[in-house]
Amino acid sequence: MVNLIAISLALFAVTTGLCASLVTVLLVRMAGWRVPDHEGEGFRPFRLRDWLTAMLTGPIFLVRAALDGYRAGEIEVSLLALVAIVAVGWGGLLGVVLLQLAYFGGLLLA
């Protein structure tokens, strides 16, 4: 028998994670954040703020970079599909963490 509650919870977690990632991408772009240089003269180590921003914006940035590579002919459709699956998984994990934080925040405020 199909457990519709588990399926709907999984879809809700994926949707929450991807939406949170998209909102974070839009906010950090308006704030002027850029991925720190990892080579050359502008190199500086990642700070905690950079790590947290990269974790939250990761799924959207990953898909956007893969789509740009696909349009430029650098990657194949199979790799694009693999990147999409990884981004959905990342968004789902992010969604589960955010939903758990919201749940425990509600318990603390009650």
Image (cartoon, rainbow, N blue to C red):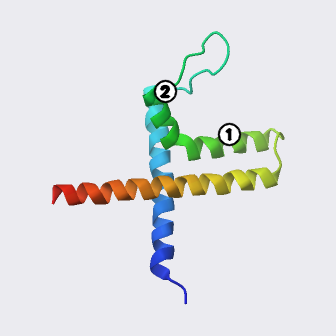
**Image-quadrant location for residue 108:** bottom left
**Residue that appears at 49% across and 33% down:** 51
Up-down relation of residue 9 to residue 75 (above or below) = below
- Pick the front one: 11 or 105: 105
* Label 1: few (<14), some (14–19) or many (≥20) C-alpha neighbours in 10 Å: few
Q: Is residue 41 left or right of residue 29?
A: right
**Residue that appears at 46% across and 33% down:** 28
Q: Secondary structure at mark 1?
A: helix
Asked whether residue 29 appears in the rendered view, the answer is no
Between disc 2 and disc 1, whose residue precedes? 2
**Residue that appears at 48% across and 75% down:** 6
Residue identified by numbered label 1 = 65
| CA distance for labels 2 and 1 | 17 Å
**Which numbered circle lies on residue 33?**
2
**Rendered location of residue 54, percent (x, y):** 52, 36
- Pick the front one: 88 or 29: 88
**Image-quadrant location for residue 84:** bottom right
Position of the N terminus, as image quadrant, is bottom right
Q: Residue furthest bottom?
A: 1
- Pick the front one: 58 or 69: 58
Up-down relation of residue 48 to residue 45 (above or below) = below
Position of the C terminus, as image quadrant, is bottom left
**Residue that appears at 43% across and 36% down:** 27
**Image-quadrant location for residue 68:** top right
**Rendered location of residue 97, percent (x, y):** 42, 54
Q: What's the amino acid at mark 2?
A: Trp
Q: Secondary structure at mark 2?
A: loop
- Pick the front one: 75 or 5: 5
